Amino acid sequence: MAEHDDDNSLFRDAVSGARPLDHDRVETPRRKPEPRARMRREDERQVLEESLQADIEQMEWRNGDALRFRRPEVGERTLRKLARGGYRVEAELDLHGYTVREAKEVLREFLADCEHFGWRCVRIIHGKGLGSGHRGPRLKGSVDGWLRRLDVVSAFVSARQVDGGSGAVYVLLRY
C-alpha cells in the first residue's frame, strides 16, 4: 500500500494549484462552414460567355499551346501535312533577341525575300517566351497576329518538337 499512498500524494501535489470551473458544460469546437463563392454561378456564367466569344486560336497562344491557322481555301489535309513537317522548309528566320518592333520589320523583309525567290514553305522561330517573365510570350502573339493579316500567308502551324515545337511555326506561302 505504500505505492498507493505515494501515487495519491503525487496526484495531490500535481493538482494542488487547480481551481474548480465556473460551469459544468464542455464546449465542443465549432467546425467552420465550407467556404463557397457568393457569386459562383455568375462567375461561371461569365467565364462561359467569354470562352464562347474569344478567338480560340488567340487563347491557345496565350496558354503556350500550338498555333494553327489556315485560310478557307487551304484544306485540313494540307494543314495536317504542314504540321507533320511534310513540306520541305526552304528558308528559316530566327527572331530570338529582337524586340517586337524590330521583329516586325525583319519578318517583313524576310517574307519579301521569300516572294522574290519563290519559296513556298518557311520556318519562323519566335521562341516560347521563357525569357519574357510574367508578361508571357510577346513575340509569339505578335507573329501570330502579323501572319494572319498578311495575304501572302496561306497557313501556318506550330512546328514539330524537333524543329522548335510551340516556339516556331511552319508557314505555307502562296505565290
Image: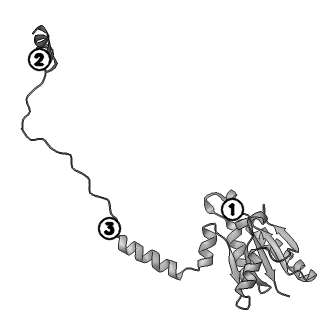
Tell me whether circle 1 and circle 2 mark residues in contact (CB < 8 Å): no
The mark found on residue 129 in the picture is: 1
Q: Is residue 96 above or below residue 71?
A: above
Residues 31 and 136: in front is 31
The quarter of the rendered structure image containing the C terminus is bottom right
Q: Is residue 7 above or below residue 118?
A: above
Q: Residues within 10 Å of mark 3 (few under 14, many from 20)?
A: few
* Residue at (41% x, 77% y) in the render: 45
How far apart are the two marked residues, 1 and 2, measured between alpha carbons? 73 Å
Q: Residues within 10 Å of mark 1 (few under 14, many from 20)?
A: some
Q: Position of residue 38 (x, y in %)?
A: 32, 67
Q: Amino acid at mark 2?
A: Arg
Q: Position of residue 102 (x, y in %)?
A: 79, 68
Tell me whether circle 1 and circle 3 mark residues in contact (CB < 8 Å): no
Count of residue discs: 3
Q: Is residue 101 above or below residue 12?
A: below
